[in-house]
């Protein structure tokens, strides 16, 4: 699992990352994977060495194979990147575009997934429903901290609700 996924919060390349407390289950007709992902970093300021453990909870639901699509809350850092010419995908709805940052390998897939019903649903509960990423054959979310059983079920429910709101035409052309 340490090397299975990429992007935030996962370390790329060689690392001391660990996956623990792995859970797989069928929930609401979907295969769910949950685990705790952690790694340590060490920094030295010339006098002291500090080791920090970074811990994340990850929940993923199986999907047909897709390109990568990530949706996160917009924040000041993204705005600054925009000023430097780095732009995310825009769907053409100002409220949505101002609330979320969208990164996609395939703009057509992203725009098909982010149909009006899904955009409205995301806007109605932005803090609880992002970040998420379609990553090959999973839809996943992550958060800081240790894995909590009740939170796993809530995150799995949110991801499944999201999948159920994806318009059918978004899946056209994806392998089953």
Image (tube, grey):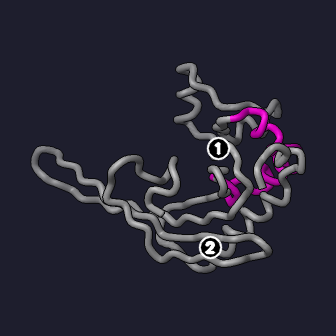
Q: Residue at x 84, y 60 (%)?
A: 164
Asked if residue 4 is among those painted magenta in the image, a careful observer would answer no
Position in image of residue 85 (x %, y %): 57, 19
Around disc 2, counting alpha carbons within 10 Å, would you say few (fewer than 14), some (14 to 19), or many (20 or more)? many
Around disc 1, counting alpha carbons within 10 Å, would you say few (fewer than 14), some (14 to 19), or many (20 or more)? many
> Mark 2 or 1, which is nearer the eye?
1
**Mark sitting earlier along the chain (2/1):** 1
Mark 1 residue element: loop
Q: Residue at x 64, y 37 (%)?
A: 103
Asked if residue 126 is among those painted magenta in the image, a careful observer would answer yes
Whether residue 69 is situated above or below residue 157 in the rendered picture: above
Residue 116 sits in quarter:
top right
Position of residue 94 in the picture relative to residue 144 (left or right): right
On residue 44, the disc is none
Residue 90 sits in quarter:
top right
Position of residue 59 in the picture relative to residue 38 (left or right): right
Position in image of residue 52 (x %, y %): 30, 59
Q: Which residue is mark 1?
A: 68
Whether residue 4 is situated above or below residue 86 in the rendered picture: below
Position of residue 67 in the picture relative to residue 50 (left or right): right
Query: What is the distance, in whole Å, between disc 2 and disc 1 at their CAs?
Result: 22 Å
**In front of the other: 167 or 148:** 167
Mark 2 residue element: helix
Q: Which residue is mark 2?
A: 152
Position in image of residue 10 (x %, y %): 46, 53
Magenta span of residues: 106-131
**In front of the other: 46 or 31:** 31
């Amino acid at each position: 699992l340490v090397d299975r996924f990429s992007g935030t919060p996962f370390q790329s390349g060689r690392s001391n990352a660990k996956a623990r407390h792995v859970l797989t289950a069928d929930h609401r007709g979907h295969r769910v994977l949950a685990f705790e992902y952690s790694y340590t970093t060490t920094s030295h300021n010339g006098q002291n060495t500090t080791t920090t453990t970074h811990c994340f909870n990850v929940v993923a639901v199986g999907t047909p194979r897709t390109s990568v699509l990530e949706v996160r809350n917009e924040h000041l850092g993204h705005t600054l990147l925009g000023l430097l010419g780095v732009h995310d995908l825009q769907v053409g709805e100002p409220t949505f575009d101002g609330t979320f940052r969208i990164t996609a390998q395939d703009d057509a897939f992203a725009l098909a997934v982010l149909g009006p019903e899904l955009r409205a649903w995301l806007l109605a509960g932005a803090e609880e429903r992002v970040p998420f990423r379609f990553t090959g054959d999973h839809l996943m979310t992550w958060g800081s901290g240790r894995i909590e059983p009740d939170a796993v079920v809530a995150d799995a429910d949110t991801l499944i609700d999201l999948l159920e709101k994806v318009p059918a035409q978004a899946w056209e052309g994806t392998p089953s």
